[in-house]
Image (cartoon, grey):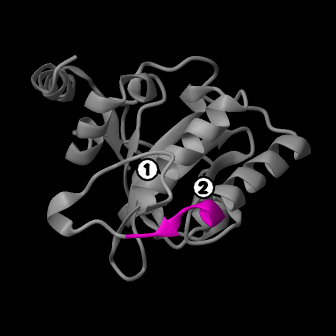
Amino acid sequence: MTTKHLVAAMAGMLFSLSAPAAHAIGPAGMAIPSKLRPLNIVVQKPTLAPFAYVKYCVANAADCAEGHGPETVAVSAKQLRQLRQVNIQVNRSIEPLYDDPDTDEWQADVVAGDCEDYVLTKRRRLIELGWPANALRIAIAYTPNNNGHAVLVVSTTKGDLVLDNRNNAVLNWRDTDLRWVMIQSPKNPLYWNEI
């Protein structure tokens, strides 16, 4: 698929999809106490994917193909340990190196990179370990310092769990310090929704 076709398909998606009714919880879902927020992220209207992700998909079509398997995984203690292990291993294996603002490039399996590169590597590793692609979604958010940030969200029966390169803990999305912006659709990673 060419860049032109990919961009056209994504633009068409924006106008053809209808999102379920939004559940207003507050700005970025962080306005009410943690125990009252849902365990899983509530998506809103469709939005365009980050352009650097679209470029990544042109070069790595297999990573951006429609997924398989369930959208939510019933996790055991063993699987939770596996999530923690992958999070820690990838966090330790990639040296932080930030892209210049004008040259944001998303890559997987790198020696040095920024948050998106950690996310793509973690997603690949988990798929190699047998995790269903549909349950592994990239999300974009803001840190408390107002920096744009990407994390991997794993949808489980225990809630949406976040793998973040800023720490080795695997947290429920509602227990992070992030202000959520957008997330991939579980059905097709080329489609994204606002949070």
Please name the residue shown 19% across and 29% down the image.
14
- Please state the horizontal and vertical placement of residue 177, each as a whole percent of the image: 52, 73
Q: Which residues are magenta?
A: 91-97
Q: Residues within 10 Å of mark 2 (few under 14, many from 20)?
A: many
Mark 2: amino acid: Val
Q: Residue furthest front?
A: 111
Mark 1: amino acid: Ala
Do the residues bearing badges 2 and 1 touch, measured as CB atoms within 8 Å? Answer: yes
Confirm whether residue 156 shows in the render: yes
Q: Which residue is mark 1?
A: 139
> Which of these two is toward me, 75 or 78?
78
> Which of these two is toward me, 38 or 136?
136
Q: For residue 115, which numbered disc appears in the image?
A: none
Q: Secondary structure at mark 1?
A: strand
Confirm whether residue 46 shows in the render: no
Q: Which residue is mark 2?
A: 162
Tell me which numbered mark, 2 or 1, is placed earlier along the sequence.
1
> Which of these two is toward me, 30 or 123?
123
Residue 57 figure quarter: top left
Residue 169 figure quarter: bottom right
Q: Residues within 10 Å of mark 1 (few under 14, many from 20)?
A: many
What is the CA distance from the residue labelled 2 to the residue labelled 1? 9 Å
Q: How many marks?
A: 2
> Which of these two is toward me, 71 or 45?
71
- Please state the horizontal and vertical placement of residue 144, each as a whole percent of the image: 42, 80
